[in-house]
Image (cartoon, rainbow, N blue to C red):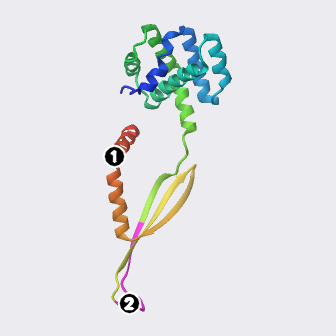
Amino acid sequence: MLLDLSEEHKEHLAFLPQVDSAVVAEFGRIAVEFLRRGSNPKIYEGAARKLSVSSDTVQHGVEGLIYLLTESSKLMISELDFQDSVFVLGFSEELNKLLLQLYLDNRKEIRTILSELAPDLPSYHSLEWRLDVQLASRSLRQQIKPSVTIKLHLNQNGDHNTQVLQTDPATLLHLVQQALEEMKTNHCRRVVRNIK
């Protein structure tokens, strides 16, 4: 699987061939440090002074490198796919090898950092449902009023919690149709593809 880099990311990474390989390696260290501890504008300003460029240029270069490393780590792309993805950028062979080594050295740590940053959302455990139909009441003798009760069991941080939902079948059918329509959108297809 190849990375699909936007033009903006390509522009940010275009700064890397203009500097020495030691500087690119330092940018890689700054990128991983950024993921660990967050942004530090002083580092960008210091690097910009040493390189005689604007701090925005340095920041964009580091952010482009962060995006390249995080997306590659998220998708766990192979060495060959990473090389092919970087080859499209038109970098020298030395720079490509340096970026590949940077990726290989840091991908496990980056995946660990990204997993810690991910929100801890409830996950599905089980579902119980019941269909109730009220056939008559004191005031109306021939009344049919169906309702669906759903008991959703969720797990979050080892804790089990339960949500009880109740609706009529028409609303439930409408929700199901909306969900199926939503699954046909490009965004949902991309999400499902990345989950697999």
Is 188 placed left or right of 123 in the picture?
A: left
Is 91 placed left or right of 24 in the picture?
A: left
What label sits on residue 140 in the rendered view?
Answer: 2
At mark 2, the secondary structure is loop
Q: Amino acid at mark 1?
A: Thr
Q: Is residue 153 above or below residue 98?
A: below
Q: Amino acid at mark 2?
A: Leu
What label sits on residue 98 in the rendered view?
Answer: none
Please tell me which residue is depicted at 46% across the width and 29% down the height of the picture. 71
**Is 95 part of what is drawn in magenta?**
no
The residue range painted magenta reads: 129-141
Residue 83 placement (x, y as % from top left): 40, 17
Could you say which quadrant of the image residue 109 lies in? Answer: top right
Residue 194 placement (x, y as % from top left): 39, 37
Q: Is residue 167 above or below residue 31?
A: below
Q: Quadrant of the C terminus?
A: top left
Q: How many marks?
A: 2
Residue 118 placement (x, y as % from top left): 54, 40
**Is 134 part of what is drawn in magenta?**
yes
Please tell me which residue is depicted at 37% across the width and 65% down the height of the picture. 172
Q: Which circle, 1 or 2, is nearer the viewer?
A: 1
Q: Is residue 147 above or below residue 183?
A: below
Q: Quadrant of the N terminus?
A: top left
Please tell me which residue is depicted at 65% across the width and 19% down the height of the picture. 45
What label sits on residue 185 in the rendered view?
Answer: 1
Please tell me which residue is depicted at 49% across the width and 25% down the height of the picture. 69
At mark 1, the secondary structure is loop
Could you say which quadrant of the image residue 31 lies in? Answer: top right
Classify mark 1: residues with Cα within 10 Å, few (<14), some (14-19) or many (20+). few
- In space, the residues marked 1 and 2 are separated at their CA atoms by 45 Å
Chain-order first, disc 1 or disc 2: 2
